[in-house]
Image (cartoon, rainbow, N blue to C red):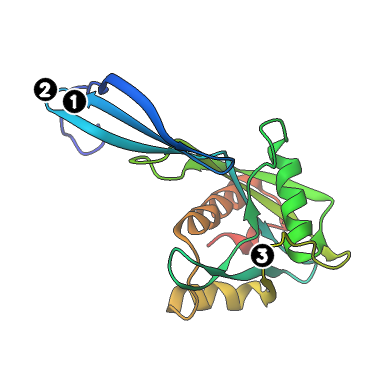
Amino acid sequence: MADGKKPAAAIAPWQVLDSRFSYRDRWLAVRSDTVRVPNGTVLSPYHTIEFPEWVCAIALTPAREIVLIEEYRHGIGRNSFELPSGAPDDPGEDLLAAMQRELREETGYASETWLYLGSSSANTARQNNRVHAYLALDVREVGPQALDPGEMIAVHVLPWADFVADLADGRLEIPGLHLAALWQLSAFARRSGDPRLEALAL
């Protein structure tokens, strides 16, 4: 290993002794397991939340402005600035198609140029899903928002440099999973060799 230490012994997975769903609806399922960890300890119940795959997009205008949404989030009890994001409407919906639909519905913007940045686990301790990040280039406003009945979303368009500076200085906060998408964008920009993306590397 790079640090000169010996590799640690492999950690065995937990043994599932019993499993049941204690709650399930169209948005999530709570799976309650009884598990035995490698040292013999039995944990019961151990709850895992099963979600569909999530998608988010870094949407940039031709002037290199980023399109953000602002929405009240009941989990934190306040408004949150975020990347446009969502989930497939049904298990058969393509992930890119889901993201294109969410961008159009939430913001009224659309793009013809989409790049896949990668994915990451949402929460390895309690969730089973991944977040898939996309870059939408040259987005343009094509119509009004098409929000769900329970959604109230404000759209903000910020110069990329101001957005990055506000994040770095703590004047703006976005969810951690969306920060991961920015890191994926930075890595993608460095690898791509595309001059359009060079200024996006953080």
Instruction: Report the amino acid beneath label 3.
Output: Glu
Q: Name the residue under label 3.
A: 151
Measure the C-alpha gap from mark 2 to mark 1.
Answer: 6 Å
Q: Mark 1 points at which residue?
A: 37
Instruction: Report the amino acid beneath label 2.
Output: Gly
Q: Residues within 10 Å of mark 3 (few under 14, many from 20)?
A: few
C-beta proximity under 8 Å, tags 2 and 1? yes
1 or 3: tag closer to the N-terminus: 1
C-beta proximity under 8 Å, tags 1 and 3? no
Q: Give the tally of numbered discs.
A: 3
Q: Which residue is drawn at 71% across and 56% down?
A: 195
Instruction: Report the amino acid beneath label 1.
Output: Val
Please identify, in this view, whether the residue under mark 3 or under mark 2 is nearer the observer.
3
- Quadrant where the image shows the N terminus: top left
Classify mark 1: helix, strand or loop: loop
Q: Mark 2 points at which residue?
A: 40
Classify mark 3: helix, strand or loop: loop
Q: Residue at x 37, y 40 (%)?
A: 124
